[in-house]
Image (cartoon, rainbow, N blue to C red):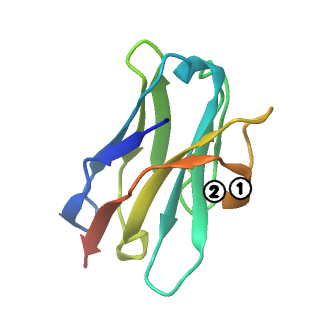
Amino acid sequence: QVQLVESGGGLVQAGGSLRLSCAVSGRTFGYYSMGWFRQAPGKERDFVAAISRTSGSTYYADSVKGRFTISRDNAKNTVWLQMNSLKPEDTAVYYCARRDGAGFAYISHREYNYWGQGTQVTVSS
């Protein structure tokens, strides 16, 4: 059974930074592309960023481009989301997800197969 465990969320002032981590169980982490999504109360789960299997390619939502960076280390079975210049509108529960199909730049949560439990990020103004 695949498990994804996020950590690193918290409360931060606007303009601050946080680094989210997602540890993934299993020996085949490097076979799959990964993504980060977020969901604010009463809203849809929105795409944030995605990374290909070998870290060769990344893709970002326009709302976070230039502020967030997704990265991974296949030897550590971990994917990160570095979030800088945070804004109050970034407040949400952040989820990491694994996509088992081909390709990586998918923005629909329906294209991902496994999910973590989420970590809360709150940005105060």
Q: Pointer 2: residues within 10 angstroms few (<14), some, or many (20+)?
A: some
Q: Residue at x 42, y 59 (%)?
A: 94
Q: Residue at x 49, y 16 (%)?
A: 27
* Image position of 107 (left or right of 43): right
Q: Secondary structure at mark 1?
A: loop
How far apart, in angstroms, are the residues tagged by discs 2 and 1?
A: 8 Å
Q: Mark 2 or 1 closer to N-term?
A: 2
Q: Residue at x 27, y 52 (%)?
A: 17
Would you name the residue on which mark 1 appears? 107
Measured as percent of width and height from the top left, residue 114 is found at 56, 46
Q: Amino acid at mark 1?
A: Ile
Q: Amino acid at mark 2?
A: Ala
Residue furthest bottom in the image: 42
Residue furthest right in the image: 102
Q: Is residue 22 above or below residue 67?
A: above
Q: Nearer the viewer, residue 22 or 64?
A: 22
Q: Secondary structure at mark 2?
A: loop
Query: Which circle marks residue 61 in the picture?
Result: 2
Q: Residue at x 30, y 64 (%)?
A: 120
Measured as percent of width and height from the top left, residue 91 is found at 37, 72
Q: Is residue 74 above or below residue 48?
A: above
Residue furthest top in the image: 75
Contact (CB < 8 A) between labels 2 and 1? yes
Q: Is residue 9 above or below residue 123?
A: above
